[in-house]
Every structure is written in C-alpha cells, then in structure tokens.
Amino acid sequence: MFSLADVRFLPEQPHHAAAIEAIADEAFGPGRFSRAAERVREMAPHDPSLSFVAELEGVVIGSVRLTPIRIGTTPALMLGPLAVRPAYKNKGAGKALMRLAADAARDTGERLIVLVGDPPYYAPLGYRSLPPGSVIMPGPVDPRRLLGLELQEGALEGIGGAVKARRRGLP
C-alpha cells in the first residue's frame, strides 16, 4: 500500500518516454491509436515543460501531457493522455497530476485546456462540457466527453472551430 505523500511529482524528462508509453498502452490498449485525441497528438508534439510524471520509489506510476493546439484562432492546450498504472489508481495521483499541469499552464499564461474524458471524473477539477459542435476534432468524438477548463476567466466564451497544431507561445 502507498500513500500519495510518498509520490514524487516531476516535470517530464526524455528518459521518462518509454515508461509513459508503457503506462498509456496498459491503460488504453491498442485502441488508443484510433481515437480523435491521438490524431491531435500526431499533429503536434506535447510540451514537456507542461507535462509531468508521478514516481513512487523511482518508478513512474502515472503521467499527464499537455499539447499546444488552436481551436479555430484560439490558443489552447489539449490534455492527454492522463494515465496511472492500475495498481495505483483511485489514490489521487491522477488528480494531482491534473492540478500540477493546470497550474503550470496557468503560470505560463495559457488560457484554456481541453480534453476528451468522463465528465464525472473531470468536473470536480473544474472541467465543463463544451457546447456541442463548437470544437471540431480530427475524428469522431462523443460531444458529451469534450470538456474544457478555463485557466483565465472567460477563456471558453465564443470558442469554436477546428483543432489544429500550434507551437507554444504562438497563436
């Protein structure tokens, strides 16, 4: 048994890549490559400075990544994958990673994070449903699972358009 107090949360480093891929494979299986969110991640690389891992006794047990995107002309970040090894789920590591990533993004001036996920899990972290049809993903997505988090008040107002890649810091 472990305590969240025993987990170290660290910025993602290149040597974490293999562990992160293994965790995503374990969490989502081979079907993850057919998801619309994966199409977004193929368009643009994630930003390692806004991506984090959870380590327990030197072993990566979870990770979260943020990818710079545009929604229409609005700069945003796409969260995902967020994954925690099954033996460590439901202990708070995933939510801690989410908060850490959102705080880091806010601190760098980012205004908005979007993701595809389960509303009951993400709503307590401030994510809310986006208006159906407002954000066009590069593949089919259940509109009830498309969620956004304002890092700055009003960032979701009038959001709309197709999701495209962007380099961080640029519109």
Image (cartoon, helix red, strand yellow):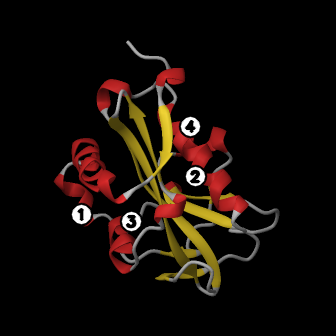
- Circle 4 — which element? helix
Q: Find disc 2 in the rendering and name its residue.
A: 101
Residue drawn 58% across the image and 52% down it: 101
Left or right: 41, with 113 as reference point: left
Residue farthest to the left, as pictured: 30
Residue 134 in which image quadrant: bottom right
Mark positioned earlier in the residue sequence (1 or 2)? 1
Q: Residues within 10 Å of mark 3 (few under 14, many from 20)?
A: many
Per the model, the C-alpha gap separating discs 3 and 4 is 21 Å
Camera-nearest residue between 78 and 65: 65
User: With respect to residue 80, does 45 lie above or below?
Assistant: below
Q: Find disc 3 in the rendering and name its residue.
A: 37
Residue drawn 62% across the image and 44% down it: 99
Mark positioned earlier in the residue sequence (3 or 2)? 3
- Circle 3 — which element? helix
Per the model, the C-alpha gap separating discs 3 and 2 is 18 Å
- Circle 2 — which element? helix
Per the model, the C-alpha gap separating discs 1 and 2 is 23 Å
Q: Find disc 1 in the rendering and name its residue.
A: 33
Mark positioned earlier in the residue sequence (1 or 4)? 1
Which of discs 3 and 4 lies nearer the camera? The answer is 4
Q: Amino acid at mark 2?
A: Ala
- Circle 1 — which element? helix
Q: Amino acid at mark 4?
A: Ala
